[in-house]
Image (cartoon, helix red, strand yellow):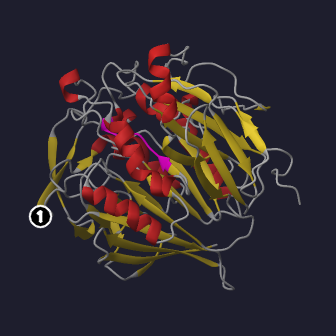
Amino acid sequence: MTDSPHAGPTTTAPSRTAPSRRTLLKAGLIGGAGVVAGPMLWTQAARSAAPAAGVHLSYGTNPLRQMNVTWSTAGSVQAPRLDLGVTPDYGLTLQPESVSSIRVDSVYHHVDLSDLRPGTRYYYRLSHDGGTPTRGSFTTAPKSDGSFRFAAFGDMGVAEDAARNVNLIRQQGAEFAFVVGDIAYADTGGQGKSGEAQQDFGVWDEFLNQIQPSANTIPWMTVVGNHEMENGNGELGYDGYRARFHLPGNGAGGGQETYSFVRGNVAFIALDGNDATYEYTRNAGYLGATLDSWLEHRLAAFRARDDIDFILVGFHQCAYCTNIAHASDGGIRDRWEALFDRYQVDVVINGHNHCYERTHLMRGGKPVQEAPRGATVSTNQGTIYITAGGGGGSTYPDVLPVLSYYTDKNGLKVPEPTTYRAVGDATHSVAFFDAHPRDAHGQARLDLEVIASDGSAVDTLTIARSR
């Protein structure tokens, strides 16, 4: 075996709707972020001395063979590069695409790797002329049909509880994280209309440094929330997000905001809830029917595949949550709930409300089977909706009212009963899922375990599906 990866992994161009494999990334733009020009000579020495920071990984379209590596430097640097190999001797050197973003000096570097070996550990080194190298490793998804664990949550920010959750994810052995929006809170307004007084884009770098102890080893698959709509940062406010994250990009409209991938027997779909929400309407309908058509196509294709048991959909705003801070969103229900029912989506994961909450089994807008803590339920009969908004931002009190509400198309809060709620908790927490392949009786299992940042138990549920 040689030290260089099998067949020489390649990097891919920014558009991943129809990617071509290349040795080097083509210079260009990512979501309007400018390609970095030559650095000012008087700042070069200081910037060159700083090592790579904010290192984070994400899957490409195929987790068996693709991985995206992103890092930042304090400014423009000479000859940024990634060395890669199946041993720490590396053997292959790749150049990144480097992009800037507004109102920060940092530069963000991306290498999209493909042609990797499934189930293989890779070692990487990030460096540039004059800088101290940063080393890490990752493991591609295996071909086998074994069990695996992943984490899911939203609303993290930069805080002590957020850092504790990063450590919790490491301790629990999650193989990747699914982050359902409101990531760093660099824009505190959250409606896409903030002035500069409510924005500090340097917070992005603080966040990326905070998650690096986990995200430099396992992929963090992110989804946009309302706080990713940064006024002045591109037409949709997403240019800051696009500069800092590389996702599969195989969704509606060809952007980073919607995508899908398959890991083991679980299909994951990421949606942009800002397109459907009735609460904050800045980006409402920008994809519209294009997104809904893509979603239905993905759901139909995944449900038809024999190797996929579970479909998990993640987006930010809540379809069902009793917490009166934001409660439930009628726009989400109107656009997507019928599709979730039609194609028997197993789990929907949201954030937005800073708490943990889980429904009973839902079908047709109402609970069809109770799912108390510790129960076993079959998602052949309905969908479980989870609010996992305890990622680290300040939590909202957990008070179960007799009536909560949903936001209707006019932005009005319409009262409704809370009979759909099964479990609720106000602590900072992370939802962990253990996916298991089908047993001898043809039944697959998805075990939910929700753990607070202090290690205490919050919720458990066994989700079963039969073919």
| Relative side of 339 to 305, left or right | left
- Is 202 placed above or below 269 here? above
What x and y, as percent, mark residue 447? 48, 75
What x and y, as percent, mark residue 209? 41, 46
What x and y, as percent, mark residue 407? 21, 42
Camera-side residue of 163 and 306: 163
| Relative side of 260 to 281, left or right | right
Bounds of the magenta segment: 221-227
- Is 382 placed above or below 378 here? above
Indicate the quadrant where residue 153 lies.
bottom left
Does the magenta run of residues contain 224? yes
Camera-side residue of 189 and 377: 189
Camera-side residue of 45 and 22: 45
Indicate the quadrant where residue 200 lies.
top left
Does the magenta run of residues contain 399? no
Who's the residue at 27% across and 36% down the image?
Answer: 278
What x and y, as percent, mark residue 367? 32, 67
Residue at disc 1, secondary structure: loop
Residue extending furthest toward the bottom: 440
Q: Quadrant of the C terminus?
A: bottom right
Who's the residue at 55% across and 36% down the image?
Answer: 131
- Is 189 placed above or below 159 here? above
Q: Which residue is mark 1?
A: 399
Q: Is residue 370 visible?
A: no
Amino acid under label 1? Val
Mark 1: few, some, or many residues within 10 Å (few <14, many ≥20)?
few
Who's the residue at 32% across and 27% down the image?
Answer: 230
